[in-house]
Image (cartoon, grey):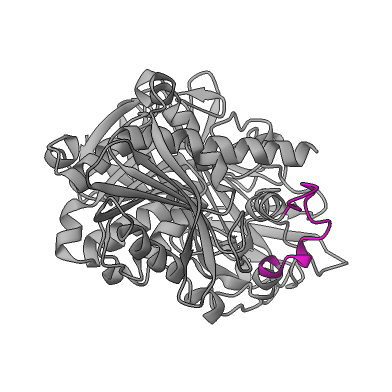
Amino acid sequence: MKVRESWARYVFVVLFAAATLRVAVAQDVGDAVVERNLPATMRDGIRLQADIYRPKGDGKYPIVLVRTPYGKAAGDTIARFITAQGYITVVQDCRGKGASEGSWYAFKNEGLDGYDSVEWAASLPGSNGKVVMWGGSYLAITQVLAAVTSPPHLAAITPWMVPSNFHEGVIYQGGALEKNVTDSWVSGVSADPVTQKPPVDLHSVDFYRDWRLHPDYDEYWKTMTIDSRPEKILAPGLYLSGWYDVFISGALRDFESVSKHGNPAVQMKQRLIIGPWTHGMSSSKSGDVDFGPAATPDPTIALRWFDYVLKGTANEFATGKPVKIFVMGKNVWREEDAWPLARAKTTRFYLHSNGNANSVTGDGSLSPTAPKKETNDQYVYDPANPVPTQGGGLCCGPKPEAGAFDQRSSEQRPDVLVYTSEPFKSDFEVTGEVQVELYTRSSAVDTDLTVKLIDVRPDGYAQNLTDGILRLRYRNSMETSELMEPGEIYKVKVDAGPTSNVFLPGHRLRIEVSSSNNPRFDANPNTGADSDREKNPIKATNAILHDSEHPSAILLPVIPQ
């Protein structure tokens, strides 16, 4: 029962963005003429049902289309509010969900069904022929998958918290299973519609079973990817996400790929807004950290985007720069010309120790000075006792909680290597994608490396900023796994994700290196087998080398001050 209750709360708050619109909705839910369960026939004859909300009075109106697998009735209040602003709002059940016909399979049919639904909505009585799509998370996925099919009447999309590649950054990351996402989301979305009970075995769900049968980035995933087809997207997008959102890398990649390689007319209208938010963008607080009143999500931002792309209103989207980011540390908004920032300078901070970087009480340090002769650090990773997840980009249940948290409890563990810089004497800004180059060896044929970027306050509070993982059998390619030779040294690169943060004077830069972050990611059994198939996991002794021949370092996109 607790699983289902948390899922219902997630759907209400996140996917229909009720939290971010609650102020505006409370003022006026509008007076609409509502038609329930109008069928739209797809090209294969399947009929999808939609509720249509029309303004009272004659006239031609633009269309706001929302496509959802969570039941269109949940969007009633917001649909009425949007309609009151001068739009026809269409909320449609995805194939095989709610009142719609057919069988639902995550991601698979959203492209062609999206195309057909856009063109159907554009032809509705009272439509002026312009359609904008809107929604977050899976509702954002339905938008981008529709957009890459190039529907002629799709004028714009408004994807909140959207991924770009369903293998990397959704189901898997760095080759590791995004266990927190898959388990909680599949349990909720696949619950029995009558009993509301989630499936006992997730492998009974066809698409989950297929995900686990395709751990490599193969043709199964490539047919669904978005980021390889930016030229197909002919509708400009307002991409919104948060530094602590599970899909932040995907949102940035979508925006960047379309801005660089998309249709020139679309490039000019692309917009990106990134706050300090978690998945849901519901408040100024992410985890334990409140980023202040300026970080409170704007309840009317989507409406102003609609006005700009559909009505030609000369608001901030017409006059401002295309990128707006929240810079943590300073806790201020800043407009930019593009993402990534052209003025960012890649700066290395090298790992150092005398071989005792284990835990925060060890001797690990970071500095811009390259190492010379140093002793490597090593630890024992036990998959039966993984490092617990503490915040970060998570979805979709109540526990563990997403966002920023003090990491010092994890840093007490001997299987966590901790490297910390000297206090900064002036502002030190990191904005962009963070990477870590590590020289490593292991006693096992396969293991994971996890990294975490941390801002350490003068009082010792260790705030996580971003993190990443690499399953080492995917060190050369996500398309083909390759086991290691125990004891051999490998140079690997771990993508730690994007952030924007100013390390204030007196603050210190820290990274953690370990081999687990669970339950966010599945615990690697160290045998080369997948975690849900291995019955006999083993311990691995893993080493990080940092000397003149093996200069392990974190690569930071530093913004000159």
In the rendered view, does 326 fall on the left or right side of 398?
Answer: left
Compared with 524, 379 (above or below) is above
Is 199 magenta? The answer is: yes
Q: Quadrant of residue 106?
A: bottom right
**Residue 88 picture quarter:** top left
**Quadrant (top left, top right, bottom left, bottom right) of the N terminus:** top right
Q: Residue at x 52, y 43 (%)?
A: 15
Image location (x, y in percent) of residue 294: 34, 22
What number of labels is visible?
Answer: 0
Q: Is residue 457 something one can see in this rendering?
A: yes
Toward the viewer: 7 or 343?
A: 7
Residue 9 shown left or right of residue 61 in the figure: right
Q: Is residue 204 left or right of residue 416?
A: right
* Residue occupying the point 47% across, 37% down: 17
Magenta residues?
191-208
Residue 508 in picture, x, y percent from top left: 45, 31
The residue furthest right is 536
Q: Position of residue 59 (x, y in %)?
A: 22, 44
Identified at 65% across, 69% down, the residue is 211
User: Which of 23/96 is in front?
Assistant: 96
Name the chief secondary structure element in magenta.
loop
Where is residue 52 shown, x and y percent of the image?
A: 43, 47
193, 376: nearer the viewer: 193
Q: In this rendering, does residue 454 appear at all?
A: no
Is residue 384 rendered magenta in the image?
A: no
Image quadrant occupied by the C terminus: top left
